[in-house]
Image (cartoon, coloured by chain):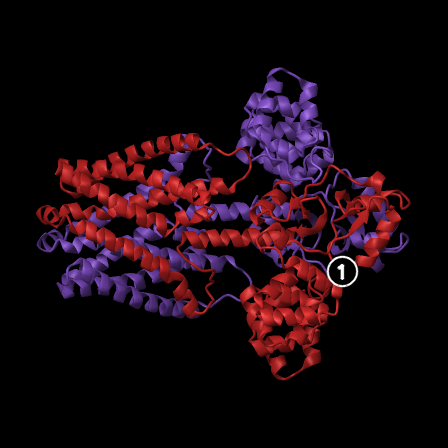
Chain colours: A red, B purple
Amino acid sequence: MEVQNPQHLPFELTKEFLNEIQALIEQDSKEELIAKIEDLFPADITSILYELNGQESKYLVQLLEVKVAAEIISDLDSDDRIKFLKNFTSQEIAVYINEIDSDDAVDILNEQPVRIREEVIALLKDRVQARYIIDLMHYDEDCAGGLMQKELIKINVKQTVTECVEEIRRQAEEVEKVYSVYVVDDDGQLLGTVSLKKIILAKRGSKIQDVFDSDEIVSVPTYMSGEEVADIMQKYDLEAIPVVNIQGRLLGRITIDDVVDFITESAQEDIQVMAGISEDVEEDDSVWLLVRSRLPWLIGGMVGSFLAAKLIEQFDSAISLMPTISAFIPLIGSTGGNVGIQSSSLIVQSLADKSGLDTTFGKRLKKVIVVALINALIAGCFSFACSFLVDNGDTMLSLTVAISLFAVVMLASLMGTLTPLALNQLKINPAVASGPFITTTNDILGYGVYFLIVYLLL
Amino acid sequence: MEVQNPQHLPFELTKEFLNEIQALIEQDSKEELIAKIEDLFPADITSILYELNGQESKYLVQLLEVKVAAEIISDLDSDDRIKFLKNFTSQEIAVYINEIDSDDAVDILNEQPVRIREEVIALLKDRVQARYIIDLMHYDEDCAGGLMQKELIKINVKQTVTECVEEIRRQAEEVEKVYSVYVVDDDGQLLGTVSLKKIILAKRGSKIQDVFDSDEIVSVPTYMSGEEVADIMQKYDLEAIPVVNIQGRLLGRITIDDVVDFITESAQEDIQVMAGISEDVEEDDSVWLLVRSRLPWLIGGMVGSFLAAKLIEQFDSAISLMPTISAFIPLIGSTGGNVGIQSSSLIVQSLADKSGLDTTFGKRLKKVIVVALINALIAGCFSFACSFLVDNGDTMLSLTVAISLFAVVMLASLMGTLTPLALNQLKINPAVASGPFITTTNDILGYGVYFLIVYLLL
């Protein structure tokens, strides 16, 4: 690799490289294949697997060292991994699970049917790993307990730096990334940490008691939500955080790579919810999955629109006398929708941001109303000017549209603010209120207001 | 702190605590204040500053050690920091900038007016820091060069582990988080790394040459975009990545905490773009800023709706003969909008996901058309059934609505797919296409199609 890539730049998969790999697999040229991929990082081989079929993938992975293969398997996307592991027996899976960090091992097993899960655990050679896995399976996957791994290095506060170095040596294989050593008392209670930098700089004979930091540590309880853990690690710039039980005993640690994945997935989930996509899908999923993920909100929106149609139909006679009324239906609907989504997104964002004190409900509402008033006034005036142009100078109609728009902006702002707050209280993801749900609701409300004002004024 | 918080749980700011702090500031009780906050982490004091006014904040920060105060200042949100630093002289700012990591120091200085920026750099006591800052100011803030810090520990490949430990000791103050030591040759070319774990386990006398990893390293060039850096660090699970110039010389490193912030900000930006909010605002920004950030898309959407109104007005005579036509306007508009946003979000998401080969344009389009066809057929049939109920059994009108809806779903899917792809080609954030822009465009197109079909069939 040194000669090929002196700047150590990241590997990029090309069509040519992929074709070569596929040809070598077909020719069963094991040695050439190994020569071609042995200098790649596991994550690069993972990106190749995404482009191969099940049989090709299995062939390639079985050429690799077990440790590398295990890392690749734990790297795969959940959907792809389920398909991939279908080609393996429980015995084969157990060999890989032995080598995978306990948190990832649990995630992988949880994707499998119960029978395979039990078989694999029973077949694990490493009984410590089996115990870790069984321990971790108790926790919900989105809380600190579900995100933590059991692999970490801990040392009793009464020991010495020399013993600590020995412990690191003993576990060097097991614990890939160390960052710091956790210091506990005889009861396993977390007292503090020693960073690797400190261990390097400390005299070998010194006591842990004299070198460790007791106040430079933050831990989280097992039941804390993944979002809160992510916020805390981000706030304190941590690369790992210890997880403790209610008595303060050290149970495991969460590393930043898992939290980064968690943050990315949560953001993607929120965007999908806003877009009215009801399942976690990607562009390259099957057509059936793509259709299924989009239909619920599509049909939901249509039901809302038919309710609106039923409402508008009540005003058939008015419309037939003055058909221009109907030309402003889109204005009312889309302005209401836009305002609603703007309002709800701001609230959702501020609910997600945990820094500082919570804004009180009253203060929040007051501000929303002031902003809504200004926007509504501007929108109303702008609309009066524009509709005057559209309806050829009918002052009364322009006034009706402007007043309706004012009311719709006010109403949509309030709805867009109150709905996510209510959902949050009910422990439902408030981002739901930034999607088709709020648009549809605001549409119907808006048409109601518009035709009410038409009825009153015209 | 030990006694108060034996589990080392994260600090939570309460209203009571804040009131005490404010009271102590007012009473000018320096010692009591220090006692109250000295056990807190800098990030916790930052969260207190968000609730204080400028004078109170300055008073509090000036009580702290310079190093702690510097960390708090680099922790603050950009907007709040600008306000906060208005209370300080260039001389005072320089004292803090001396202690801040070079990447953060540059971010802070870039927020200041040019005059203050130049003054602060001239006033810096630490001339190495001044050189670092001037170096880093050349880079765009969203590329690898702009995200990197100059603080890192490097060692010549010809040196020994003992010398490496001495280098770590010498720089222990300067480089807070080490992770690993970078190995370079006489020209400063990056050859590899040694992890701290390896240094601990290696014999002190060994040569770096014999212990370092030359193939376990990925570096990025200065011009790489922040998104790509984030993807690479996430793909390879890195806590720091070295940045090299075109000749492979080591220039700096990017640490995971900055990348996490970058990921979070990018996700938030995308959500705001989707919600039609045109500036980076938060709920607690000023009313004026909130109004200003929302008006452009609000007015933009209204202009679109007035164009739609002009279009619908052309069909006044048809509507006055058959007013029920207008009852289906919301159905056409909102279904088109929903479908467009669903399509564009999927494409935006898959454009952001760099793993694997790019899907070819033809393949992508084929799949989009298949999914759209199925959705359009289902939507059309569903609508036929529903509109039959709404318009009291008028087969011809129901058919017109169903055909229009079919056409609108197809059209909106295509628009929702092609717009982000085109924006991406033009190097504009494709998320723009998931917001009001795509809804408004689809609205107008949809009404056009609907009234065309009304005109043809009825």
Q: Position of A290 compared to B127: left or right?
A: left
Query: Which residue in the structure is indicated by mark 1?
Result: A174
Provide residue B39's location: percent of width, then percent of height. Answer: 70, 31
In the figure, B118 relative to A202: above or below?
above
Where is residue A393 drawn, in percent x and y?
A: 13, 38
**Amino acid at dot 1:** Glu
Whether residue A244 is visible, yes or no, is yes
Left or right: A46, with A162 as reference point? left
- Identify the residue shown where x is 65% and y is 66%: A72
- Nearer-the-camera pick, A59 or A251: A251
Task: Quadrant for residue A332, please give it.
Answer: top left
- Image quadrant holding the N terminus of chain B, namely top right
- Where is residue A129 drawn, in percent x and y? 72, 63
Q: Residue furthest bottom?
A: A27
The answer to whether residue B225 of the structure is visible from this angle is no
Q: Nearer the viewer, residue B136 or A126?
A: A126
Q: Disc 1 sits on a residue from what chain?
A: A
- Quadrant placement of the C terminus of chain B: bottom left
Crowd class of label 1 (few under 14; some 14 to 19; many from 20; radius 10 Å): some
x 40%, y 65%: residue:
A292
